[in-house]
Image (cartoon, grey):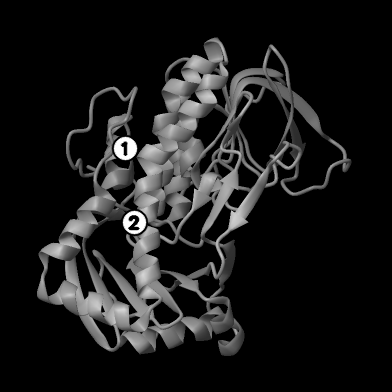
Amino acid sequence: MGSSPSAANPAPDRDWDVVVVGAGPAGALAAFDLARRGLRVLLVEKRRFPRWKVCGCCLNGQACSVLAAVGLGGLIDGQGGVPLNQIRVGLGGRQASFPLPDGRALSRERFDQALVQAAIAAGASFRPHTSARLGAADARGRTVHLRPGGGRPPGAGGETAVRAAVVLVAAGLAHRCLEDEPGAGVHIQPRSRVGAGCVLPAGTGGYTPGCIHMAVGRRGYVGLVRLEDGRLDLAAAFDRPLLTEAGGPAAGAARVLEQAGFPVPPALAAARWQCTPALTRRATPLAGERFLVLGDAAGYVEPFTGEGMGWALTAAAAATPLVLAGVRAWQPALERQWIRTLQRQVGRRQRLCRGVAALLRQPVAAAALFQLARRVPPLPRRLIRQLNHPPAIAGAPSPVYGPVPCR
C-alpha cells in the first residue's frame, strides 16, 4: 500500500494563503487544486494515514469526471481501481442488475493517500494527527488553532496558532472545529440512519468484481463491492432499532442480506466493524468570515452508488474560484455565492438521493419501484444518469462536457 504521506516542507510557518482542515477526498483535492495554482496551502488531518473509512470506496462517473477535470484522471487506475459496470439490487428475495457506467472501486486507504500525496507533490504542506479549531478573524485573515495528537482536548499542551486568508473546513461528519463560531450546529434528520462497515478477506466468496451489490431490507441496506486487492468492502445504513434488536452491525447486516436473497459471508461476525454518527444531516453555517465548509462537514445524505464521493470532489473543485478571490480580498458576497454553489452542484443530487431513500423505507412503495425498474429498464438507467451526471466546474482547466472515465 505504500508508506504514509508525510508533511511536505514542515516549516514552522504561521501565515498561509489557505488552511484546509480535513484530508479526506474533499480536503485533499481542494489542497491539491489550490497548491498547483501557486497558493501556500496547509492541509491538516486529525487522524494518521493511511486510514480506513466505513464507506466511500465507490467512485461514480461524476467523481471520475471531476478528477479528470483537475488533472488527476489517471489517479484511480494508477492505484489499481476496479472498473464498475453494473449494480445488482436485491429486495424481497429477488434481484435485478442495471448498468453503472464509468465507475471505479478503490479502497479509501489507497485513494485518500494518493490524493494527499498529489497535494504534497503540488506544493501543499501536510500535518497529520493534528486537530484544528477556528479562532478569530481580522483584516489579515483567520486564526486556526492546531493541536498535535488529533483528539487531544484544549489545554493539553502543544497548541499553536496559524493564520490563513481563507480556511476550508472539510473535517467530516462529526467535526468540532467550528464549535466556537456563533450559530454553529448540526440538524440531524429525524429517524436518520447510522452507517456501519467492515472489510472482509479476499477469499470471501459470492460477490463478483466490477459490480456493486445492493441489498435492500426492511430497516436498512447493505452495499458490497470488491476492492483492488480482492477484499470485499461492506458498507451499510441501518435504522437504529435494527442494531439494538439484532445485537450489533454484523447481525443486522446478515438480516438485510437474507431479506434481499444475497449470501451472508461467513466472516461477517468476526469482522472488525466501524460505525458512523447519524448519516442524514445539515450543518450551519456553510460559510462565514474567511471560511467555507465543504464535503461531509457541510451535510450528508445516504448515498447508493458512490454519490458521496462525487459530492465531496465536486465541492472541492467548485471551491477553487471562490478561494482564489478570497485570498486576494475577502468579501461577504463570497459566502452567499458559496451557499448557492453548493446548492447547485450538490444539493439537487442530495435531494434526489433523499427521495429514493424515503421510498425504500416504505415496503409497498419499495416493492412497486423495484418491479417497475425491472420491467422498464430505461427508468433506473435515467436515475443513475441523474446521479452520475458530470458537473460543470468553474475554474477547471477544461470544461467537462460528458462522462469522462478514469484512465
User: How far across and how far down the image is residue 43, in percent?
Assistant: 58, 32
Which residue is label 1 attached to?
66
User: How far across and how far down the image is residue 333, in percent?
Assistant: 52, 20
Whether residue 298 is visible here, answered yes or no, is yes
Q: Is residue 192 left or right of residue 394?
A: right
Residue sitting at 15 percent across and 76 percent down?
374
Give amino acid for label 1: Val
Residue sitting at 22 percent across and 42 percent down?
407
Q: Residue 268 versus residue 254: which sits nearer the camera?
A: 254
User: How far across and how far down the image is residue 145, in percent?
Assistant: 75, 32
Mark 1 and mark 2: Cα distance apart in space: 20 Å
Residue 168 lies in quadrant? top right
Q: Is residue 310 left or right of residue 333?
A: left
Q: Is residue 74 left or right of residue 144?
A: left
Residue 67 lies in quadrant? top left
Point out the frontmost of discs 1 and 2. Answer: 2
- Under tag 2, what secondary structure? helix
Relative height, residue 390 to residue 304 (above, below): above
Relative height, residue 259 to residue 160 (above, below): below
Residue 125 lies in quadrant? top right
Whether residue 52 is visible here, answered yes or no, is no
How many labels sit on residues?
Answer: 2
Which residue is label 2 attached to?
352
Give amino acid for label 2: Leu
Labels 1 and 2: the sequence-earlier one: 1
Relative height, residue 238 to residue 302 (above, below): below
